[in-house]
Image (cartoon, helix red, strand yellow):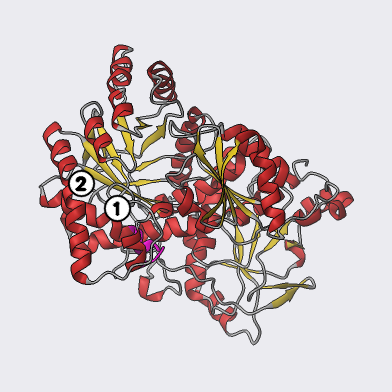
Protein backbone atom coordinates (compact mmCIF):
# COMPACT_ATOMS: atom_id res chain seq x y z
CA UNK A 1 0.00 0.00 0.00
CA UNK A 2 1.30 3.42 -0.93
CA UNK A 3 0.74 6.58 1.04
CA UNK A 4 -2.23 8.89 0.75
CA UNK A 5 -0.01 11.95 0.31
CA UNK A 6 3.69 12.40 -0.53
CA UNK A 7 4.49 13.88 2.90
CA UNK A 8 2.84 13.91 6.33
CA UNK A 9 3.93 17.54 6.81
CA UNK A 10 1.78 20.34 5.33
CA UNK A 11 0.71 18.15 2.41
CA UNK A 12 -0.61 19.87 -0.68
CA UNK A 13 -4.27 19.41 -1.53
CA UNK A 14 -4.90 16.18 -3.42
CA UNK A 15 -5.46 16.87 -7.12
CA UNK A 16 -8.76 15.51 -8.40
CA UNK A 17 -10.62 15.63 -11.68
CA UNK A 18 -13.65 17.89 -12.07
CA UNK A 19 -17.16 16.54 -11.51
CA UNK A 20 -20.11 18.75 -12.43
CA UNK A 21 -23.34 18.84 -10.42
CA UNK A 22 -25.63 21.21 -12.26
CA UNK A 23 -23.85 24.60 -12.18
CA UNK A 24 -21.48 23.50 -9.38
CA UNK A 25 -18.04 22.03 -10.01
CA UNK A 26 -16.48 19.67 -7.47
CA UNK A 27 -12.73 19.05 -7.62
CA UNK A 28 -10.19 20.49 -10.01
CA UNK A 29 -9.32 24.06 -9.09
CA UNK A 30 -12.63 24.61 -7.28
CA UNK A 31 -12.77 25.41 -3.59
CA UNK A 32 -14.35 23.14 -1.00
CA UNK A 33 -18.07 22.74 -1.80
CA UNK A 34 -20.43 22.85 1.21
CA UNK A 35 -23.44 20.53 1.26
CA UNK A 36 -26.39 19.75 3.52
CA UNK A 37 -29.49 17.56 3.56
CA UNK A 38 -33.17 18.38 3.91
CA UNK A 39 -34.88 17.25 7.12
CA UNK A 40 -38.35 17.70 5.61
CA UNK A 41 -40.46 14.78 4.41
CA UNK A 42 -39.86 14.32 0.68
CA UNK A 43 -43.61 13.88 0.19
CA UNK A 44 -44.11 17.47 1.39
CA UNK A 45 -42.84 19.39 -1.64
CA UNK A 46 -43.68 22.81 -0.20
CA UNK A 47 -41.68 22.19 2.99
CA UNK A 48 -38.75 20.79 1.00
CA UNK A 49 -38.67 23.78 -1.33
CA UNK A 50 -38.81 26.19 1.60
CA UNK A 51 -35.96 24.41 3.41
CA UNK A 52 -33.85 24.16 0.24
CA UNK A 53 -34.19 27.90 -0.34
CA UNK A 54 -33.21 28.61 3.28
CA UNK A 55 -30.12 26.45 2.83
CA UNK A 56 -29.26 28.18 -0.44
CA UNK A 57 -29.60 31.55 1.24
CA UNK A 58 -27.31 30.38 4.07
CA UNK A 59 -24.56 29.46 1.59
CA UNK A 60 -25.24 25.77 0.98
CA UNK A 61 -24.01 24.86 -2.51
CA UNK A 62 -25.61 21.40 -2.94
CA UNK A 63 -28.80 20.13 -1.31
CA UNK A 64 -29.56 16.44 -0.75
CA UNK A 65 -32.98 14.90 -0.16
CA UNK A 66 -33.93 11.31 0.58
CA UNK A 67 -35.99 9.22 -1.83
CA UNK A 68 -37.05 6.06 -0.03
CA UNK A 69 -39.25 4.57 -2.79
CA UNK A 70 -40.00 5.08 -6.48
CA UNK A 71 -43.32 6.73 -5.60
CA UNK A 72 -41.62 9.19 -3.23
CA UNK A 73 -38.92 9.83 -5.84
CA UNK A 74 -41.63 11.02 -8.23
CA UNK A 75 -42.17 14.00 -5.93
CA UNK A 76 -38.64 15.21 -6.66
CA UNK A 77 -40.05 16.74 -9.84
CA UNK A 78 -42.24 19.09 -7.81
CA UNK A 79 -39.41 19.90 -5.43
CA UNK A 80 -37.00 20.66 -8.24
CA UNK A 81 -39.57 22.78 -10.10
CA UNK A 82 -40.44 24.71 -6.93
CA UNK A 83 -36.77 25.51 -6.28
CA UNK A 84 -36.18 26.64 -9.87
CA UNK A 85 -39.38 28.71 -9.99
CA UNK A 86 -38.16 30.56 -6.89
CA UNK A 87 -35.04 31.56 -8.81
CA UNK A 88 -32.55 29.21 -7.19
CA UNK A 89 -30.21 26.97 -9.17
CA UNK A 90 -28.88 25.06 -6.15
CA UNK A 91 -28.33 21.47 -7.34
CA UNK A 92 -30.57 18.73 -5.94
CA UNK A 93 -29.21 15.31 -4.96
CA UNK A 94 -31.34 12.21 -4.39
CA UNK A 95 -30.19 10.04 -1.48
CA UNK A 96 -30.89 6.38 -2.27
CA UNK A 97 -30.82 3.32 -0.03
CA UNK A 98 -32.13 -0.17 -0.87
CA UNK A 99 -34.27 0.78 -3.91
CA UNK A 100 -32.75 0.75 -7.42
CA UNK A 101 -36.15 1.64 -8.90
CA UNK A 102 -36.22 4.77 -6.71
CA UNK A 103 -32.80 5.73 -8.06
CA UNK A 104 -33.93 5.30 -11.65
CA UNK A 105 -36.93 7.53 -11.03
CA UNK A 106 -34.91 10.13 -9.11
CA UNK A 107 -32.38 10.39 -11.93
CA UNK A 108 -35.07 12.01 -14.07
CA UNK A 109 -35.37 15.03 -11.78
CA UNK A 110 -32.11 15.72 -9.96
CA UNK A 111 -28.54 16.75 -10.77
CA UNK A 112 -26.93 13.98 -8.75
CA UNK A 113 -27.78 10.59 -7.23
CA UNK A 114 -26.12 9.22 -4.11
CA UNK A 115 -26.01 5.43 -3.79
CA UNK A 116 -24.72 3.35 -0.89
CA UNK A 117 -22.85 0.26 -2.16
CA UNK A 118 -23.68 -1.54 1.08
CA UNK A 119 -27.41 -1.65 0.44
CA UNK A 120 -28.09 -0.64 -3.18
CA UNK A 121 -28.07 -4.23 -4.37
CA UNK A 122 -27.75 -6.06 -1.06
CA UNK A 123 -29.90 -6.46 2.00
CA UNK A 124 -28.28 -6.60 5.40
CA UNK A 125 -28.88 -9.95 7.07
CA UNK A 126 -25.66 -10.37 9.07
CA UNK A 127 -25.33 -13.83 7.57
CA UNK A 128 -22.00 -15.59 7.85
CA UNK A 129 -21.00 -17.02 4.51
CA UNK A 130 -17.74 -18.17 3.05
CA UNK A 131 -17.60 -17.01 -0.57
CA UNK A 132 -15.47 -18.87 -3.05
CA UNK A 133 -13.87 -16.74 -5.76
CA UNK A 134 -16.49 -18.03 -8.19
CA UNK A 135 -19.35 -17.14 -5.84
CA UNK A 136 -17.88 -13.71 -5.24
CA UNK A 137 -17.59 -13.09 -8.99
CA UNK A 138 -21.23 -14.17 -9.38
CA UNK A 139 -22.24 -11.66 -6.71
CA UNK A 140 -20.40 -8.89 -8.54
CA UNK A 141 -22.19 -9.83 -11.76
CA UNK A 142 -25.52 -9.60 -9.92
CA UNK A 143 -24.58 -6.16 -8.60
CA UNK A 144 -23.63 -4.97 -12.08
CA UNK A 145 -27.01 -6.13 -13.37
CA UNK A 146 -28.75 -3.93 -10.78
CA UNK A 147 -26.36 -0.97 -10.76
CA UNK A 148 -25.45 -0.79 -14.44
CA UNK A 149 -28.80 0.67 -15.61
CA UNK A 150 -28.43 3.60 -13.17
CA UNK A 151 -24.94 4.31 -14.47
CA UNK A 152 -26.25 4.31 -18.03
CA UNK A 153 -29.10 6.64 -17.05
CA UNK A 154 -26.81 9.10 -15.27
CA UNK A 155 -24.40 9.09 -18.20
CA UNK A 156 -27.22 9.66 -20.73
CA UNK A 157 -28.70 12.52 -18.69
CA UNK A 158 -25.36 14.12 -17.85
CA UNK A 159 -25.91 13.96 -14.09
CA UNK A 160 -23.46 13.15 -11.32
CA UNK A 161 -23.28 10.35 -8.78
CA UNK A 162 -21.83 9.83 -5.33
CA UNK A 163 -20.67 6.34 -4.47
CA UNK A 164 -21.01 6.72 -0.73
CA UNK A 165 -19.96 3.93 1.62
CA UNK A 166 -21.18 4.00 5.22
CA UNK A 167 -19.34 2.11 7.94
CA UNK A 168 -22.72 1.21 9.40
CA UNK A 169 -24.10 -0.49 6.31
CA UNK A 170 -21.49 -2.70 4.68
CA UNK A 171 -22.91 -5.69 2.83
CA UNK A 172 -22.58 -9.25 4.09
CA UNK A 173 -20.34 -10.01 1.10
CA UNK A 174 -17.89 -7.26 2.05
CA UNK A 175 -18.13 -8.04 5.77
CA UNK A 176 -17.21 -11.65 5.20
CA UNK A 177 -14.27 -10.97 2.92
CA UNK A 178 -12.83 -7.81 4.50
CA UNK A 179 -14.56 -7.50 7.85
CA UNK A 180 -16.07 -4.39 9.38
CA UNK A 181 -12.99 -2.40 8.42
CA UNK A 182 -11.86 0.72 6.56
CA UNK A 183 -10.47 -1.61 3.87
CA UNK A 184 -13.94 -3.13 3.49
CA UNK A 185 -15.43 0.34 3.08
CA UNK A 186 -12.95 1.20 0.35
CA UNK A 187 -13.31 -2.06 -1.54
CA UNK A 188 -17.10 -1.78 -1.42
CA UNK A 189 -16.92 1.59 -3.20
CA UNK A 190 -14.30 0.45 -5.71
CA UNK A 191 -16.53 -2.44 -6.84
CA UNK A 192 -19.19 0.08 -7.88
CA UNK A 193 -16.65 2.48 -9.37
CA UNK A 194 -15.29 -0.24 -11.66
CA UNK A 195 -18.78 -0.86 -13.00
CA UNK A 196 -19.13 2.86 -13.74
CA UNK A 197 -15.73 3.06 -15.40
CA UNK A 198 -16.45 0.00 -17.55
CA UNK A 199 -19.35 2.04 -18.97
CA UNK A 200 -17.06 5.06 -19.52
CA UNK A 201 -18.88 7.04 -16.83
CA UNK A 202 -16.65 9.23 -14.70
CA UNK A 203 -18.86 12.01 -13.31
CA UNK A 204 -18.83 10.63 -9.77
CA UNK A 205 -17.34 11.26 -6.33
CA UNK A 206 -16.55 8.97 -3.40
CA UNK A 207 -17.33 9.13 0.30
CA UNK A 208 -16.35 6.94 3.29
CA UNK A 209 -18.53 8.03 6.21
CA UNK A 210 -18.41 6.70 9.76
CA UNK A 211 -19.50 7.90 13.19
CA UNK A 212 -16.10 7.03 14.68
CA UNK A 213 -13.56 9.69 13.59
CA UNK A 214 -10.66 7.22 13.77
CA UNK A 215 -12.43 4.80 11.40
CA UNK A 216 -13.44 7.64 9.10
CA UNK A 217 -9.92 9.11 8.91
CA UNK A 218 -8.35 5.70 8.23
CA UNK A 219 -10.95 4.89 5.55
CA UNK A 220 -10.48 8.14 3.65
CA UNK A 221 -6.69 7.91 3.80
CA UNK A 222 -6.90 4.35 2.56
CA UNK A 223 -9.26 5.42 -0.23
CA UNK A 224 -6.87 8.17 -1.38
CA UNK A 225 -3.97 5.72 -1.33
CA UNK A 226 -5.91 3.05 -3.23
CA UNK A 227 -7.06 5.52 -5.88
CA UNK A 228 -3.48 6.67 -6.41
CA UNK A 229 -2.43 3.04 -6.65
CA UNK A 230 -5.09 2.33 -9.29
CA UNK A 231 -3.70 5.05 -11.58
CA UNK A 232 -3.72 8.74 -12.38
CA UNK A 233 -7.13 8.58 -14.02
CA UNK A 234 -8.70 7.36 -10.75
CA UNK A 235 -8.38 10.88 -9.32
CA UNK A 236 -12.08 11.27 -8.50
CA UNK A 237 -13.18 13.93 -6.00
CA UNK A 238 -13.89 12.99 -2.40
CA UNK A 239 -16.79 14.07 -0.20
CA UNK A 240 -16.10 14.22 3.56
CA UNK A 241 -18.48 13.72 6.45
CA UNK A 242 -18.74 12.23 9.92
CA UNK A 243 -22.09 10.49 10.02
CA UNK A 244 -24.19 10.54 13.20
CA UNK A 245 -21.94 13.23 14.72
CA UNK A 246 -24.69 14.44 17.09
CA UNK A 247 -25.61 17.93 18.23
CA UNK A 248 -24.21 20.91 20.13
CA UNK A 249 -20.52 21.09 20.93
CA UNK A 250 -20.13 17.32 20.69
CA UNK A 251 -21.35 17.24 17.10
CA UNK A 252 -19.16 20.17 16.09
CA UNK A 253 -16.09 18.71 17.77
CA UNK A 254 -16.52 15.24 16.28
CA UNK A 255 -17.08 16.71 12.79
CA UNK A 256 -14.04 18.97 13.15
CA UNK A 257 -11.84 16.05 14.17
CA UNK A 258 -12.87 13.87 11.24
CA UNK A 259 -13.35 16.41 8.46
CA UNK A 260 -10.72 18.88 9.64
CA UNK A 261 -8.00 16.25 10.01
CA UNK A 262 -8.51 15.10 6.43
CA UNK A 263 -8.70 18.60 4.98
CA UNK A 264 -5.44 19.33 6.77
CA UNK A 265 -4.01 16.25 5.05
CA UNK A 266 -5.08 17.66 1.69
CA UNK A 267 -7.96 15.21 1.24
CA UNK A 268 -11.47 16.43 0.42
CA UNK A 269 -13.29 18.42 -2.25
CA UNK A 270 -16.73 18.76 -0.69
CA UNK A 271 -17.98 18.50 2.90
CA UNK A 272 -21.09 18.14 4.98
CA UNK A 273 -21.20 18.72 8.73
CA UNK A 274 -23.99 16.38 9.92
CA UNK A 275 -25.65 17.78 13.04
CA UNK A 276 -28.76 16.61 14.85
CA UNK A 277 -30.12 20.13 14.48
CA UNK A 278 -32.01 22.11 11.84
CA UNK A 279 -29.98 21.73 8.67
CA UNK A 280 -29.41 25.46 8.22
CA UNK A 281 -27.12 25.43 11.29
CA UNK A 282 -24.72 23.08 9.52
CA UNK A 283 -23.65 25.65 6.93
CA UNK A 284 -21.84 28.25 9.09
CA UNK A 285 -20.03 25.43 10.92
CA UNK A 286 -18.85 23.92 7.64
CA UNK A 287 -17.71 27.29 6.33
CA UNK A 288 -15.91 28.11 9.57
CA UNK A 289 -14.24 24.69 9.58
CA UNK A 290 -12.91 25.16 6.05
CA UNK A 291 -11.60 28.63 6.95
CA UNK A 292 -9.99 27.30 10.13
CA UNK A 293 -8.16 24.50 8.31
CA UNK A 294 -6.97 26.88 5.58
CA UNK A 295 -5.46 29.06 8.29
CA UNK A 296 -3.95 26.16 10.25
CA UNK A 297 -2.28 24.63 7.21
CA UNK A 298 -0.12 27.69 6.66
CA UNK A 299 3.41 26.85 7.73
CA UNK A 300 6.49 28.92 6.92
CA UNK A 301 9.04 26.15 7.33
CA UNK A 302 9.79 23.22 5.04
CA UNK A 303 10.30 19.91 6.83
CA UNK A 304 12.67 17.44 5.21
CA UNK A 305 11.20 14.26 6.72
CA UNK A 306 9.59 11.47 4.70
CA UNK A 307 7.08 8.75 5.51
CA UNK A 308 10.05 6.42 6.07
CA UNK A 309 11.01 8.52 9.09
CA UNK A 310 7.66 8.61 10.93
CA UNK A 311 6.70 6.20 13.68
CA UNK A 312 2.98 5.77 13.08
CA UNK A 313 0.88 3.91 10.53
CA UNK A 314 -1.63 6.34 8.99
CA UNK A 315 -3.98 3.49 8.11
CA UNK A 316 -4.13 1.69 11.48
CA UNK A 317 -4.64 3.44 14.80
CA UNK A 318 -2.13 2.55 17.50
CA UNK A 319 -1.23 4.78 20.41
CA UNK A 320 2.42 5.80 20.52
CA UNK A 321 4.16 3.65 23.14
CA UNK A 322 5.67 6.01 25.67
CA UNK A 323 6.94 5.10 29.12
CA UNK A 324 4.82 5.73 32.17
CA UNK A 325 6.19 8.51 34.37
CA UNK A 326 4.90 10.47 37.36
CA UNK A 327 4.17 14.17 36.84
CA UNK A 328 3.15 16.09 39.97
CA UNK A 329 2.37 12.72 41.55
CA UNK A 330 0.03 11.68 38.72
CA UNK A 331 0.88 8.75 36.40
CA UNK A 332 1.17 9.83 32.77
CA UNK A 333 2.12 8.04 29.54
CA UNK A 334 2.21 4.35 28.78
CA UNK A 335 -1.30 2.92 29.01
CA UNK A 336 -2.53 5.68 31.33
CA UNK A 337 -5.48 7.79 30.24
CA UNK A 338 -4.68 11.04 28.44
CA UNK A 339 -4.27 13.71 31.12
CA UNK A 340 -5.73 17.23 31.14
CA UNK A 341 -3.33 20.10 31.91
CA UNK A 342 -4.14 23.72 32.65
CA UNK A 343 -2.20 26.89 33.41
CA UNK A 344 -1.56 28.16 36.94
CA UNK A 345 -3.75 31.19 36.23
CA UNK A 346 -6.72 29.02 35.27
CA UNK A 347 -6.12 26.59 38.14
CA UNK A 348 -6.21 29.43 40.62
CA UNK A 349 -9.41 30.76 39.06
CA UNK A 350 -11.01 27.34 39.63
CA UNK A 351 -9.32 26.55 42.96
CA UNK A 352 -12.39 27.35 45.06
CA UNK A 353 -14.47 24.69 43.32
CA UNK A 354 -12.04 22.08 41.98
CA UNK A 355 -13.23 19.49 44.51
CA UNK A 356 -16.77 19.97 43.16
CA UNK A 357 -15.96 19.43 39.50
CA UNK A 358 -16.24 15.63 39.65
CA UNK A 359 -14.63 13.90 36.65
CA UNK A 360 -14.04 17.16 34.83
CA UNK A 361 -11.30 18.75 36.91
CA UNK A 362 -7.86 19.85 35.68
CA UNK A 363 -5.19 17.38 36.74
CA UNK A 364 -1.77 19.02 36.31
CA UNK A 365 -0.54 22.63 36.23
CA UNK A 366 1.72 22.99 33.21
CA UNK A 367 4.15 25.35 34.98
CA UNK A 368 4.72 22.67 37.66
CA UNK A 369 5.03 19.73 35.26
CA UNK A 370 8.68 20.08 34.26
CA UNK A 371 7.68 19.62 30.61
CA UNK A 372 10.58 20.24 28.27
CA UNK A 373 9.52 22.60 25.46
CA UNK A 374 11.50 22.17 22.24
CA UNK A 375 11.55 23.21 18.61
CA UNK A 376 11.43 19.79 16.88
CA UNK A 377 13.63 21.19 14.09
CA UNK A 378 16.41 21.88 16.61
CA UNK A 379 18.68 18.86 16.31
CA UNK A 380 20.66 19.77 19.44
CA UNK A 381 17.47 19.94 21.52
CA UNK A 382 16.30 16.57 20.16
CA UNK A 383 19.71 15.02 20.84
CA UNK A 384 19.67 16.36 24.41
CA UNK A 385 16.21 14.85 24.91
CA UNK A 386 17.07 11.47 23.45
CA UNK A 387 20.32 11.25 25.41
CA UNK A 388 18.39 11.59 28.66
CA UNK A 389 18.71 8.59 30.97
CA UNK A 390 15.04 8.76 31.90
CA UNK A 391 11.81 9.40 30.02
CA UNK A 392 10.94 13.09 29.91
CA UNK A 393 7.62 14.82 29.35
CA UNK A 394 8.13 16.85 26.17
CA UNK A 395 6.10 19.44 24.31
CA UNK A 396 6.52 21.94 21.48
CA UNK A 397 7.64 25.48 22.22
CA UNK A 398 5.14 28.29 21.78
CA UNK A 399 5.58 30.85 19.02
CA UNK A 400 7.06 28.60 16.32
CA UNK A 401 6.38 29.14 12.62
CA UNK A 402 4.92 25.64 12.30
CA UNK A 403 1.38 24.38 12.25
CA UNK A 404 0.50 22.48 15.42
CA UNK A 405 -0.04 19.21 13.54
CA UNK A 406 3.25 19.49 11.65
CA UNK A 407 5.13 20.40 14.81
CA UNK A 408 3.90 17.45 16.87
CA UNK A 409 4.19 14.96 14.03
CA UNK A 410 7.80 16.06 13.62
CA UNK A 411 8.38 15.76 17.37
CA UNK A 412 6.88 12.25 17.37
CA UNK A 413 9.11 11.30 14.43
CA UNK A 414 12.33 12.54 16.03
CA UNK A 415 11.89 11.99 19.77
CA UNK A 416 12.35 8.51 21.22
CA UNK A 417 8.90 6.95 21.69
CA UNK A 418 9.66 6.52 25.42
CA UNK A 419 9.16 10.25 26.00
CA UNK A 420 5.50 11.15 26.72
CA UNK A 421 4.12 14.08 24.75
CA UNK A 422 2.02 17.00 25.97
CA UNK A 423 -0.17 18.32 23.13
CA UNK A 424 -1.24 21.95 22.83
CA UNK A 425 -4.19 23.16 20.80
CA UNK A 426 -2.25 26.20 19.64
CA UNK A 427 1.31 27.48 19.79
CA UNK A 428 -0.04 31.02 20.04
CA UNK A 429 -1.83 31.30 23.42
CA UNK A 430 -4.94 33.43 23.22
CA UNK A 431 -4.85 36.99 24.47
CA UNK A 432 -8.29 37.81 23.13
CA UNK A 433 -11.16 37.19 25.58
CA UNK A 434 -13.65 38.19 22.86
CA UNK A 435 -12.56 35.57 20.35
CA UNK A 436 -15.47 33.65 18.80
CA UNK A 437 -15.74 30.35 20.67
CA UNK A 438 -16.63 28.36 17.54
CA UNK A 439 -13.27 29.35 16.05
CA UNK A 440 -11.49 28.22 19.22
CA UNK A 441 -13.44 24.96 19.32
CA UNK A 442 -12.72 24.11 15.68
CA UNK A 443 -9.02 24.96 15.93
CA UNK A 444 -8.55 22.87 19.07
CA UNK A 445 -10.58 19.96 17.69
CA UNK A 446 -8.68 19.81 14.40
CA UNK A 447 -5.24 20.12 15.98
CA UNK A 448 -5.67 17.90 19.03
CA UNK A 449 -8.10 15.45 17.43
CA UNK A 450 -5.93 14.85 14.39
CA UNK A 451 -2.87 14.09 16.51
CA UNK A 452 -4.77 11.86 18.93
CA UNK A 453 -6.20 9.90 15.99
CA UNK A 454 -2.60 9.48 14.78
CA UNK A 455 -1.83 7.90 18.17
CA UNK A 456 0.24 10.88 19.33
CA UNK A 457 -0.24 12.47 22.75
CA UNK A 458 -0.31 11.55 26.44
CA UNK A 459 -1.74 14.82 27.77
CA UNK A 460 -3.49 17.91 26.41
CA UNK A 461 -3.41 21.62 27.19
CA UNK A 462 -5.93 24.15 25.87
CA UNK A 463 -4.28 27.54 25.34
CA UNK A 464 -6.64 29.08 22.82
CA UNK A 465 -9.54 29.67 25.23
CA UNK A 466 -9.30 32.28 27.98
CA UNK A 467 -12.19 31.13 30.18
CA UNK A 468 -10.93 28.47 32.64
CA UNK A 469 -14.10 26.38 32.81
CA UNK A 470 -14.75 26.55 29.10
CA UNK A 471 -11.19 25.53 28.21
CA UNK A 472 -11.49 22.58 30.57
CA UNK A 473 -14.80 21.47 29.08
CA UNK A 474 -13.32 21.73 25.58
CA UNK A 475 -10.34 19.56 26.50
CA UNK A 476 -12.51 16.79 27.93
CA UNK A 477 -15.01 16.92 25.04
CA UNK A 478 -12.21 16.58 22.47
CA UNK A 479 -10.79 13.58 24.32
CA UNK A 480 -14.28 12.04 24.43
CA UNK A 481 -15.00 12.67 20.73
CA UNK A 482 -11.64 11.21 19.68
CA UNK A 483 -12.17 8.13 21.85
CA UNK A 484 -9.13 8.91 24.01
CA UNK A 485 -10.93 9.34 27.32
CA UNK A 486 -14.56 8.51 28.00
CA UNK A 487 -15.83 10.59 30.90
CA UNK A 488 -19.55 10.84 30.11
CA UNK A 489 -22.24 9.06 28.18
CA UNK A 490 -21.31 8.86 24.50
CA UNK A 491 -24.08 9.49 21.96
CA UNK A 492 -24.13 8.57 18.29
CA UNK A 493 -27.03 10.59 16.87
CA UNK A 494 -27.82 10.90 13.18
CA UNK A 495 -28.97 14.13 11.55
CA UNK A 496 -32.63 14.21 10.67
CA UNK A 497 -33.83 13.66 7.11
CA UNK A 498 -36.99 12.68 5.27
CA UNK A 499 -36.52 9.05 6.34
CA UNK A 500 -36.63 9.92 10.03
CA UNK A 501 -39.53 8.30 11.88
CA UNK A 502 -39.53 10.53 14.98
CA UNK A 503 -38.34 13.98 16.06
CA UNK A 504 -34.61 13.38 16.46
CA UNK A 505 -33.79 16.62 18.24
CA UNK A 506 -36.39 16.34 21.02
CA UNK A 507 -35.89 12.58 21.36
CA UNK A 508 -32.11 12.89 21.64
CA UNK A 509 -32.59 15.51 24.35
CA UNK A 510 -34.98 13.24 26.28
CA UNK A 511 -32.50 10.39 26.09
CA UNK A 512 -29.69 12.69 27.27
CA UNK A 513 -31.79 13.79 30.24
CA UNK A 514 -32.48 10.19 31.23
CA UNK A 515 -29.04 8.69 30.61
CA UNK A 516 -26.49 11.52 30.61
CA UNK A 517 -24.89 10.36 33.87
CA UNK A 518 -23.93 6.88 32.57
CA UNK A 519 -20.19 7.33 32.20
CA UNK A 520 -18.72 5.14 29.46
CA UNK A 521 -22.05 3.93 28.03
CA UNK A 522 -22.48 4.53 24.29
CA UNK A 523 -26.01 5.05 23.00
CA UNK A 524 -26.98 5.37 19.34
CA UNK A 525 -30.08 7.33 18.33
CA UNK A 526 -31.04 6.56 14.73
CA UNK A 527 -34.01 7.96 12.86
CA UNK A 528 -34.42 4.94 10.59
CA UNK A 529 -33.05 1.56 9.67
CA UNK A 530 -30.55 2.71 6.98
CA UNK A 531 -27.52 2.94 9.26
CA UNK A 532 -29.10 1.67 12.44
CA UNK A 533 -27.89 -1.95 12.65
CA UNK A 534 -24.37 -1.21 11.45
CA UNK A 535 -23.79 1.75 13.74
CA UNK A 536 -25.08 -0.38 16.63
CA UNK A 537 -21.80 -2.27 16.31
CA UNK A 538 -20.01 0.66 17.94
CA UNK A 539 -22.75 1.35 20.49
CA UNK A 540 -23.79 -0.46 23.64
CA UNK A 541 -27.48 0.33 23.13
CA UNK A 542 -29.50 1.67 20.24
CA UNK A 543 -32.78 3.55 19.79
CA UNK A 544 -33.93 3.18 16.17
CA UNK A 545 -37.05 4.23 14.30
CA UNK A 546 -38.75 1.06 13.08
CA UNK A 547 -42.05 2.45 11.81
CA UNK A 548 -43.99 5.69 12.26
CA UNK A 549 -44.47 6.12 16.01
CA UNK A 550 -42.68 2.83 16.75
CA UNK A 551 -39.17 2.27 18.10
CA UNK A 552 -36.85 -0.73 18.01
CA UNK A 553 -34.25 -1.09 20.76
CA UNK A 554 -30.86 -2.68 20.22
CA UNK A 555 -28.12 -4.20 22.31
CA UNK A 556 -24.97 -3.86 20.22
CA UNK A 557 -26.15 -4.54 16.68
CA UNK A 558 -28.90 -6.93 17.68
CA UNK A 559 -32.51 -5.73 17.81
CA UNK A 560 -34.06 -7.03 21.04
CA UNK A 561 -37.27 -5.00 21.44
CA UNK A 562 -39.59 -4.23 18.54
CA UNK A 563 -42.39 -1.74 17.76
CA UNK A 564 -42.38 0.01 21.12
CA UNK A 565 -44.72 3.03 21.19
CA UNK A 566 -42.63 6.17 20.98
CA UNK A 567 -44.03 7.65 24.21
CA UNK A 568 -42.78 4.57 26.12
CA UNK A 569 -39.49 4.05 24.34
CA UNK A 570 -37.13 6.15 26.47
CA UNK A 571 -38.36 4.46 29.64
CA UNK A 572 -37.98 1.06 28.00
CA UNK A 573 -34.44 1.99 26.93
CA UNK A 574 -33.63 2.74 30.57
CA UNK A 575 -35.10 -0.65 31.55
CA UNK A 576 -32.92 -2.34 28.91
CA UNK A 577 -29.79 -0.64 30.26
CA UNK A 578 -30.73 -1.79 33.77
CA UNK A 579 -31.34 -5.36 32.54
CA UNK A 580 -27.77 -5.43 31.25
CA UNK A 581 -26.28 -4.12 34.51
CA UNK A 582 -25.05 -0.88 32.96
CA UNK A 583 -27.29 1.41 35.01
CA UNK A 584 -26.25 3.51 37.98
CA UNK A 585 -28.35 6.13 39.71
CA UNK A 586 -27.48 9.72 38.91
CA UNK A 587 -25.13 11.28 41.49
CA UNK A 588 -25.61 14.64 43.08
CA UNK A 589 -24.77 17.16 40.34
CA UNK A 590 -21.21 18.44 40.31
CA UNK A 591 -20.71 22.16 39.82
CA UNK A 592 -21.02 22.89 36.13
CA UNK A 593 -17.85 23.36 34.11
CA UNK A 594 -19.89 25.62 31.85
CA UNK A 595 -19.03 28.40 34.29
CA UNK A 596 -15.80 30.36 34.21
Residue 7 position by quadrant: bottom left
Pointer 2 residue:
147
Which quarter of the figure is the C terminus placed in?
top right
Identified at 44% across, 52% down, the residue is 210
Tell me the tag on residue 14.
Answer: 1
- Residue 144 visible in the shown view: yes
Q: Position of residue 181 (x, y in %)?
A: 40, 63
Residue drawn at (30%, 24%) of the image: 76
Q: Is residue 180 magenta?
A: yes
Instruction: Tell me which segment is drawn in magenta.
Output: 178-185
Q: How many marks?
A: 2
Label 1 element class: loop
Q: Where is the N terminus found, in terms of image quarters?
A: bottom left
In the displayed structure image, the side of residue 384 where residue 325 appears, left or right: right
From the viewer's perspective, is residue 418 above or below residue 351? below
Front residue of 478 and 348:
478
* Residue 159 image position (x, y, % from top left): 19, 34
State yes or no: residue 37 in magenta: no
- Image x and y of residue 352, in percent: 89, 50
**Near-viewer residue (566 or 476):** 566
Amino acid sequence: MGTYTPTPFSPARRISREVTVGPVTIGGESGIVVQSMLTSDTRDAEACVREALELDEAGCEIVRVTAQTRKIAENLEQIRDGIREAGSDVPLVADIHFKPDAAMEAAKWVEKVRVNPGNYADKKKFEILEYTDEQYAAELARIEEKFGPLVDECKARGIAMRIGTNHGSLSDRIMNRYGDTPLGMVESALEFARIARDRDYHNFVFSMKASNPKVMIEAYRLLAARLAEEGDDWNYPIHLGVTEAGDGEDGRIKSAIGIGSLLHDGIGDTIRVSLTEDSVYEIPVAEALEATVNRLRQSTSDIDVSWDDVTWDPFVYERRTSEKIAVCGIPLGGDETVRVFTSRKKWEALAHKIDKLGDFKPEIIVEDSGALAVDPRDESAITFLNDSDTAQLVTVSDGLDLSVIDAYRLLAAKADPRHPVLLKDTLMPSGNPDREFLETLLEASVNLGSLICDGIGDAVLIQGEEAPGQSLRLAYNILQASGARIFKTDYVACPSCGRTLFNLQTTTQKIREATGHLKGVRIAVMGCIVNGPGEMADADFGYVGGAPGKINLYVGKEAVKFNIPEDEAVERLVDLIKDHDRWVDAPEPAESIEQG
